[in-house]
Image: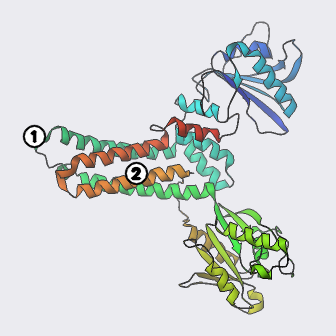
């Protein structure tokens, strides 16, 4: 996505009706539009910056469109770093569209155009009001689905994540400086690795990076959530288990086998982590299906299983294991954690329990009586790698984790080169340079324009 330097305008509030709606403008010469769209006192052409002015918003002929507040932010003291005008009126879709159209009409001479998705935040990034990690946190805060995710996004938006990345970069730069100095002045015959404690510095950087990665990975889980698929034969209680986890009657439950014909999804919270639980049609051999609808449902079940982060294989504890259950288990994809959930212990006489066996984790519970559900919740978080810590988490994205992993690998390579003493200092320096590059890509100090276009295109219009 390519952006130009023309002034921009957009509705900055969410679609739909609301008490308040905002039209936002940003760019050069925005102040010249204020007397054209606002009915100000005769002695006033521009409202006092950063002060709310009650006014009427008017058409070209002076007729009123709406009444509300006009707030002018003079650059660089604004969200984008440019001159910004916010017109805050009533939140009706029609009146906001009328006001936006009037602004675009009045701004033709200065080249005012409709903003693209994320363009306001992109300009804030280009004008050094936010770095890239903070800009992404803006969208994450808007989209946060849990309180924990919102708190972590707020941490990143305030610059905490960027701060720790900058600290890592400073440590890498310091070590690079020592290496480059040794390469530039070999006649000094300094035993660099020993006298500068290069190995010790490298170890400390690696340990710090590992800590940041763990915190970022936990934060990524808060952002993206877990995809958990309930799978098993018909009438083993999958829908009842979904309802028990959700704490509401989401799925239809009857004694009739095969009630669920299609996927039923619900997002719940476990310890603040968003969990997308997908109930699926009961699995049986295709020739045993009652009709074409059930066969399609079974096919969709297997498609959902392929996308799962965790599979809950639900079984009937009262009936015990069957050959069909083992056939289902054998078809699960390799590498995906499986929890074998033995439901209906209210009929089997089992006690709520969790067993770690070689084939999988086995949990005994009753979805009907909500007995043993807490054991299942705790196990799902454990399998996902979630650890409850008192440390701050950063709502990281997949690209952040990829960059941190790449930086870690370059530090591993540097450690191997350090073992060769001074014989490979040039390669050692190169691995440090690549580490710095990967870390800088997180905050946007080393980022391609193509990547910026992809990132900001996913923002909502008006932000």
Q: Residues within 10 Å of mark 2 (few under 14, many from 20)?
A: many
Q: Is residue 235 visible?
A: no
Along the horizontal axis of the image, is 269 left or right of 413? right
Q: Is residue 205 left or right of residue 302?
A: left
Q: Residue furthest right?
A: 63
Query: Residue 390 or 119: which is nearer the viewer?
Result: 119
**Mark 1 residue element:** helix
Q: Position of residue 36 (x, y in %)?
A: 78, 13
Q: Is residue 228 visible?
A: yes
Q: Indicate left or right for 214 with 268 as reference.
A: left
Instruction: Name the image quarter holding residue 200.
Output: bottom left
Residue 188 in the image, given as x and y percentages of width and height: 11, 41
Q: CA distance from mark 1 to mark 2?
A: 32 Å
Q: How is the image coloured?
A: rainbow
Quadrant placement of the C terminus: top right
Q: Which residue is mark 1?
A: 187
Rendered residue at 80%/10% (across/down): 41
- Rendered position, 158 above or below 251: above
Q: Residues within 10 Å of mark 1 (few under 14, many from 20)?
A: few
Residue placed most toward the observer, 128 or 238: 238
Residue 306 horizontal/vertical position (percent): 64, 67
Q: Which residue is mark 2?
A: 407
User: How many labels, in total?
Assistant: 2
Q: Residue at x 65, y 21 (%)?
A: 7
Query: Residue drawn 55% across and 41% down?
Result: 134
Residue 433 appears left or right of 287: left
Q: Residue at position x 67%, y 54% from top? A: 147
Numbered circle sitting on residue 74: none
**Between residues 367 and 155, which one lies in front from this camera angle?**
367
Q: Say which quadrant the N terminus sits in.
A: top right
Which residue, as the protein is rendered here, is positioned at the far front?
A: 287
Between 23 and 152, the residue placed more toward the observer is 23
């Amino acid at each position: 996505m390519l952006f130009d330097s023309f002034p921009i305008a957009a509705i900055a509030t969410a679609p739909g009706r609301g008490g308040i709606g905002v039209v936002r403008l940003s760019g050069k010469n925005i102040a010249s539009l204020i007397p054209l769209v606002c009915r100000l006192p005769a002695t006033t052409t521009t409202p006092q910056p950063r002060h709310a002015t009650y006014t009427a918003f008017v058409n070209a002929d002076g007729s009123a469109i709406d009444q509300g507040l006009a707030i002018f932010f003079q650059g660089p003291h604004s969200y984008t770093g440019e001159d910004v005008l916010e017109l805050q009126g009533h939140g009706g879709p029609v009146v906001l569209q009328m006001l936006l159209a009037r602004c675009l009409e009045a701004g033709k001479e200065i080249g005012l155009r409709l903003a693209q998705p994320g363009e306001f935040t992109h300009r804030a990034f280009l004008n050094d009001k936010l770095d890239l990690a903070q800009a992404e946190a803006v969208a994450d805060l808007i989209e946060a689905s849990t309180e924990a995710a919102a708190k972590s996004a707020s941490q990143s938006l305030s610059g905490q994540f960027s701060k720790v990345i900058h600290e890592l970069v400073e440590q890498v730069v310091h070590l690079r400086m020592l290496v480059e100095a040794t390469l530039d002045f070999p006649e000094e015959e300094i035993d660099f690795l020993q006298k500068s404690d290069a190995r010790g510095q490298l170890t400390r950087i690696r340990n710090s990076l590992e800590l940041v990665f763990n915190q970022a990975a936990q934060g990524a889980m808060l952002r993206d959530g877990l995809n958990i698929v309930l799978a098993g034969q018909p009438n083993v209680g999958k829908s009842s288990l979904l309802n028990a986890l959700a704490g509401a009657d989401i799925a239809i439950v009857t004694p009739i086998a095969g009630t669920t014909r299609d996927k039923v999804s619900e997002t719940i919270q476990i310890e603040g982590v968003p969990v997308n639980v997908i109930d699926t049609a009961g699995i049986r051999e295709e020739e045993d299906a009652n009709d074409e609808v059930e066969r399609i449902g079974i096919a969709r079940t297997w498609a959902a299983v392929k996308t799962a982060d965790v599979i809950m294989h639900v079984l009937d504890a009262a009936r015990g294991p069957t050959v069909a259950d083992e056939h289902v288990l054998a078809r699960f994809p390799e590498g995906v954690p499986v929890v074998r959930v033995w439901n209906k212990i209210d009929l089997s006489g089992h006690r709520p329990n969790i067993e770690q066996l070689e084939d999988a984790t086995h949990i005994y519970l009753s979805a009907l009586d909500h007995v043993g559900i807490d054991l299942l919740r705790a196990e799902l978080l454990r399998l996902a790698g979630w650890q409850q810590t008192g440390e701050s988490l950063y709502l990281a994205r997949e690209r952040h984790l990829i960059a941190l992993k790449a930086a870690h690998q370059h530090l591993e390579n540097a450690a191997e080169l350090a073992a060769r003493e001074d014989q490979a200092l040039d390669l050692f320096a190169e691995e440090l340079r690549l580490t710095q590059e990967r870390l800088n890509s997180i905050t946007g100090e080393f980022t391609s324009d193509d990547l910026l276009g992809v990132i900001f295109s996913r923002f909502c219009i008006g932000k």
